[in-house]
């Protein structure tokens, strides 16, 4: 049977929700996107997008979650007054389970690299490191085992509940993650010629501010903040009535952005020190960075060993904070809609996502015939969620809050029943009703190839 719903503590609101946003999107995707899109030019546009579009989108999902005080499907149905709007919640739950499935494969690679860095297996030359990753990803068994292990770790946290599991883990993991980031940033920025990497991140070349870069930055802002996955809606259902939604959204966005910038300071100075191009792309953390750490700290190998091990510890922790939130979205749904215990609701999610993870792992390694429309299953799942489900979910949520939900409910939730100035509500509401849907729609159409510029 379903028990009484827990609430996050005051600090738990920030740490747990920020933990859901902070993940490989910050530590992995943000640096390589910044590298490919011109450094500081991308960063400036990214910060503008987070402030003008990301925060309004977060508040919109928070309103649905807190007012609904239930899983995403029930929350959208309750707030909208119609079962038809629950389709947004269903999309979020499907999206979160697919993401957890393929995300666990990448997280499993991080665990293998964490072990390899501890065991000193990444000390070879660049060709050796490249073959190491190729051999790992093409294995039929090892990556799948690591992926299932990662989902199992997530399962253990989620089954312990909101306060004793999710919030307690966030209180431990988030400070540790930030501490590791700062340690590696200090080590990276102390290298010879590190200033070139710092300059790349903070000194903009305004000629790089193209329409493509602007849209990439907007897409990264929504991806990084977990918009459109029902994650924010689900977590907000555990917020107390006294939680200031606008203030919490701003604090979470600031923490998320600071961690992304620290990730850039961790990678770009070290890459500049050894002459590695910052636009190495998605292979950056598994192929390029092991060589960067080895060459950058060649004169003091023990420091290179510590930095490498710390880096993959950081990646694993960041991945875990995100997978916990993805798991909780579906666990809350199965627990409340089917009146199951939290343990059995979590078991269903773990089993389904483990199956997805195994097939995704095989699709990019041992059995490339596991594909949809000729695309490996892992890549198909990535494209389906990032290009379709997430932007569509965020778009529909903005339409829902901006045009469907009674303005009295929206205003009361946003202002905390008169505690937040009304003029901020009107600015936010205009953004959610007009600006956010237009911008998300442009991203959506561009990603599908309908418009190109």
Image (cartoon, rainbow, N blue to C red):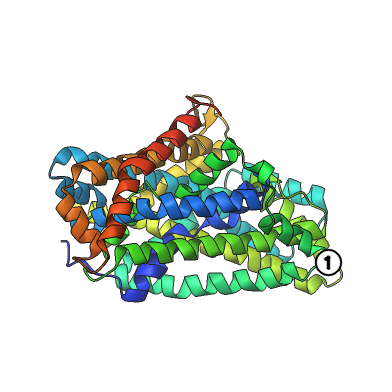
Residue shown at the point (87%, 70%) measured from the top left: 299
Residue shown at the point (67%, 68%) measured from the top left: 185
Under circle 1, the secondary element is loop
Give residue 207's position: percent from left, percent from top: 68, 42
Residue shown at the point (39%, 37%) measured from the top left: 438
Q: Nearer the viewer, residue 410 or 13?
A: 410
Does 77 sit left or right of 209 as displayed? left
Q: Is residue 274 visible?
A: yes
Judge whether 306 appears above or below 96 on screen.
Answer: below
Residue underneath mark 1: 192
Q: Residue furthest left?
A: 81
Residue shown at the point (53%, 29%) measured from the top left: 375
Q: Nearer the viewer, residue 444 or 324?
A: 444
Give residue 135's position: percent from left, percent from top: 69, 45
Q: Where is residue 445, by image quadrant?
A: top left
Q: Nearer the viewer, residue 158 or 14?
A: 14
């Amino acid at each position: 049977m379903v028990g009484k719903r827990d609430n996050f503590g005051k600090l738990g609101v920030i740490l747990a929700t920020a933990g859901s946003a902070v993940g490989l999107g910050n530590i992995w995707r943000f640096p390589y996107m910044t590298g490919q899109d011109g450094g500081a030019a991308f960063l400036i546009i990214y910060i503008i997008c987070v402030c003008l579009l990301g925060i309004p989108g977060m508040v919109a999902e928070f309103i649905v979650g807190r007012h609904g005080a239930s899983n995403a499907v029930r929350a959208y149905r309750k707030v909208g007054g119609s079962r038809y709007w629950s389709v947004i919640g269903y999309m979020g739950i499907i999206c979160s389970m697919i993401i957890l499935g393929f995300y666990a494969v990448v997280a499993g690679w991080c665990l293998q690299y964490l072990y390899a860095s501890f065991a000193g297996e990444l000390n070879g030359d660049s060709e050796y490191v490249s073959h190491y990753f190729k051999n790992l990803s093409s294995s039929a068994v090892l990556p799948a085992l690591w992926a299932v292990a990662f989902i199992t770790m997530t399962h253990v946290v989620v089954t312990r509940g909101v306060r004793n599991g999710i919030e307690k883990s966030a209180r431990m993991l988030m400070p540790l993650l930030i501490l590791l980031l700062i340690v590696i940033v200090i080590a990276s920025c102390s290298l010879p010629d590190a200033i070139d990497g710092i300059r790349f991140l903070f000194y903009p070349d305004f000629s790089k501010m193209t329409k493509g870069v602007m849209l990439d930055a907007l897409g990264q802002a929504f991806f990084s903040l977990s918009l459109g996955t029902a994650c924010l809606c689900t977590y907000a259902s555990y917020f107390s009535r006294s939680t200031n939604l606008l203030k919490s959204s701003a604090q979470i966005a600031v923490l998320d952005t600071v961690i992304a910038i620290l990730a850039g300071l961790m990678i770009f100075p070290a890459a500049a020190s050894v002459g590695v191009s910052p636009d190495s792309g998605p292979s950056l953390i598994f192929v390029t960075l092991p060589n960067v750490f080895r060459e950058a700290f060649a004169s003091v190998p023990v420091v290179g060993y510590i930095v490498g091990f710390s880096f993959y510890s950081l990646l694993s922790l960041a991945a875990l904070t995100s997978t916990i939130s993805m798991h909780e979205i579906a666990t809350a749904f199965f627990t409340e809609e089917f009146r199951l215990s939290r343990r059995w609701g979590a078991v269903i999610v773990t089993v389904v996502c483990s199956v997805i993870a195994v097939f995704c792992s095989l699709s990019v390694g041992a059995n490339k015939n596991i594909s949809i429309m000729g695309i490996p299953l892992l890549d198909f799942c990535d494209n389906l969620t990032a290009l379709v489900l997430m932007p569509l979910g965020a778009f529909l949520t903005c339409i829902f809050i901006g045009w469907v939900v009674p303005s009295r409910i929206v205003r009361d939730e946003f202002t905390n029943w008169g505690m937040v100035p009304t003029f901020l509500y009107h600015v936010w509401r205009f953004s959610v009703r007009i600006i956010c849907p237009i911008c998300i729609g442009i991203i959506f159409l561009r990603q599908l190839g309908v418009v190109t510029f």
